[in-house]
């Protein structure tokens, strides 16, 4: 009996093993998009998480094995996940009403493609205002080279938190509601009042005061923190707290490290609206990559990080050991968040959630210093697309080349071209601009030509002009938009469209209908 079962089972088992060996590469990892509780400042709120069945946050595949995911929507509303920064086939890009239909509640959607990059990426909902509820997660693409960068590697997701629901924040920005009263905030430590209704156009120009800024120390050849008298950055959403890995500094993530050990911090600005300054404090850091793409290493202890961008910072824990906070301060606020690297026996320091001073706006101090380790091949630009970033502050409408999305205007290109995009801003607000499906290189900043960083998200500071270049080698309809969620939602979005691209999912009218205000 045993034998006969064995005879029957063996071939089945062999078939199964062979099938598994061949099929394992395409076996999808299921990513569940679901509601989870989050305790912030003593209050429990409901937010969103993207988790695998075993609770792992996000998805971090081996480059060699490719990308194989099934997104399962367990929310009560539609969703759609975008794989930020990946070079992928157009229909895998995850943008509702551009490259696919939204995933209805209870349904799922499959994503399979080869991976062309490695390093620090992330995923987030591209549906409505879900990103503000942390519908986002890390996406680290591993190779032996990525693993060899440091003994220990730590992912730090930075985000912005408000007790005010995102729809309410948006209404406040549009001037449809008054800012919530202070009673909406839980009692506790002193912090900035929540004023999500504060609007750019209605603000008086801030006068110079002592603010934190970044500077290049020419003598020591490093990026450092400085305090100078300058206007504070203008920001349009003021948050109740900033989070690092979903925690405030009252109860930060504490990461055990060893004396003398190298640590690679993979910082992701997964915030909806908040740009950051990252402070490595007593640890000297080496900036190895931005947006997952290697740069010529730059030393420093104070770095700029725009919304949706990433920084790979390598630090070495001193031989004496101790506790080393890695802090991020919000641009234009005193709010701080961060994690603590700690050696055995050291105690976790009490950390304040506020800095002594606010900050200036992000600028090009850092960007001008960055040089791609793997730049685009030498070639002249065939076609330059203009992208004038504007805003009608009084109506809270944000535009590219004078137009607010949804519309059927597109920036048209042809496959095979070297394309430039020139961003210009004439207002007091910077915009972190993201192009889907391509790596681009920063080639000109305020008239100065450089072989700058390869990126997927460019922080364009107030009153600046910057040009990026990319090779048109990935046909499709590709979003180009501001990554400040409330700017994206109120118009600062367009598409770069290849000649002859499949546009069947690009439905601006359907998007306008889906997101029409319900009241
Ligand atoms: Cu913007």
Image: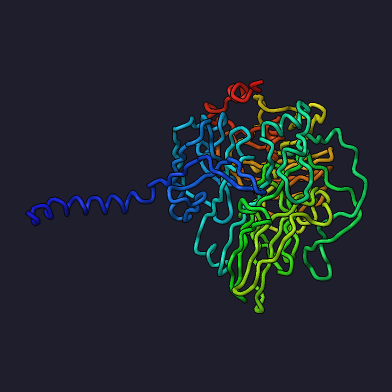
On screen, residue 229 versus residue 366, left or right, reads: right
Quadrant location of ligand 1? top right
Is 283 drawn above or below residue 104 in the view shown?
below
Is 358 drawn above or below residue 424 in the view shown?
below
Q: Position of residue 308 (x, y in %)?
A: 66, 47
Furthest residue in direction front, as rendered:
187
On screen, residue 3 versus residue 474, left or right, reads: left
The quadrant in which the C terminus is found is top right
Name the residue located 83 percent from the left edge and 46 percent from the top edge.
233
- Which color scheme did the rendering employ for the protein? rainbow
Q: How many marks?
A: 0
Is 149 drawn above or below residue 11 in the view shown?
below
Q: Position of residue 71 (x, y in %)?
A: 47, 40
Q: Position of residue 510 (x, y in %)?
A: 58, 22
On screen, residue 96 versus residue 243, left or right, reads: left
Residue 445, visible in the rendered structure: no
Name the residue located 21 percent from the left edge and 53 percent from the top edge.
13
Name the residue located 55 percent from the left edge and 37 percent from the top edge.
475
Foreground residue among 442 and 23: 23
Furthest residue in direction left, as rendered:
1
Is 183 drawn above or below residue 305 in the view shown?
above
Q: Position of residue 334 (x, y in %)?
A: 79, 52
**Hey, which quadrant is residue 500 in on the image?**
top right
The quadrant in which the N terminus is found is bottom left
């Amino acid at each position: 009996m045993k034998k006969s079962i064995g005879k029957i089972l063996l071939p089945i088992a062999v078939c199964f093993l062979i099938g598994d060996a061949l099929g394992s590469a395409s076996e999808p990892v299921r990513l569940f998009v679901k509601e989870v509780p989050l305790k912030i400042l003593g209050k429990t709120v409901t937010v969103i998480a993207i988790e695998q069945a075993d609770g792992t946050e996000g998805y971090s595949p081996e480059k060699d094995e490719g990308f194989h995911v099934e997104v399962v929507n367990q929310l009560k509303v539609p969703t759609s996940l975008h794989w930020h920064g990946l070079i992928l086939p157009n229909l895998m890009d995850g943008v509702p009403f551009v490259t696919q239909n939204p995933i209805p509640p209870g349904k799922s959607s499959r994503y399979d493609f080869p991976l062309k990059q490695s390093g620090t990426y992330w995923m987030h909902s591209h549906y409505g205002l879900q990103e503000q509820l942390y519908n986002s997660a890390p996406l680290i693409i591993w190779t032996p080279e990525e693993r060899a960068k440091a003994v220990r590697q730590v992912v730090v997701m930075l985000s912005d938190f408000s007790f005010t629901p995102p729809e309410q924040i948006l209404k406040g920005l549009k001037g449809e509601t008054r800012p919530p009263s202070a009673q909406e905030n839980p009692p506790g430590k002193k912090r900035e009042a929540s004023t999500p209704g504060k609007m750019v156009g209605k603000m008086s120009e801030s006068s110079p005061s002592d603010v934190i800024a970044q500077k290049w120390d020419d003598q020591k050849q490093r990026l450092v923190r400085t305090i100078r008298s300058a206007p504070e950055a203008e920001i349009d959403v003021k948050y109740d707290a900033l989070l690092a890995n979903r925690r405030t500094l009252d109860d930060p993530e504490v990461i055990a490290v060893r004396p003398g050990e190298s640590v690679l911090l993979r910082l992701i600005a997964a915030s909806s609206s908040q740009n950051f300054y990252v402070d490595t404090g007593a640890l000297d850091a080496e900036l190895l990559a931005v947006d997952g793409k290697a740069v010529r290493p730059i030393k420093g202890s104070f770095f700029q990080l725009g919304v949706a961008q990433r920084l790979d910072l390598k630090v070495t824990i001193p031989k004496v050991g101790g506790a080393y906070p890695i802090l991020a301060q919000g641009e234009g606020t005193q709010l701080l968040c961060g994690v603590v690297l700690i050696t055995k026996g050291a105690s976790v320091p009490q950390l304040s959630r506020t800095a002594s001073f606010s900050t200036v706006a992000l600028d090009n101090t850092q960007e001008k210093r960055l040089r791609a380790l793997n730049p685009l091949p030498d070639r002249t630009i065939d076609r330059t697309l203009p992208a004038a970033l504007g805003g009608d502050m009084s109506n809270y409408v944000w535009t590219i080349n004078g137009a607010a999305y949804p519309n059927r205007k597109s920036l048209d290109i042809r496959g095979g071209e070297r394309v430039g995009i020139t961003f210009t801003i004439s207002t007091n607000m910077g915009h972190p601009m993201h192009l889907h499906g391509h790596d681009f290189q920063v080639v000109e900043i305020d008239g100065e030509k450089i072989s700058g960083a390869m990126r997927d998200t460019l922080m364009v500071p107030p009153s600046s002009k910057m040009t990026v270049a990319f090779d048109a080698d990935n046909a499709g309809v590709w979003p180009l938009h501001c990554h400040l969620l409330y700017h994206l939602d109120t118009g600062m979005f367009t598409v770069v469209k290849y000649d002859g691209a499949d546009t069947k999912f690009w439905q601006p009218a359907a998007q306008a209908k889906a997101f029409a205000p319900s009241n």
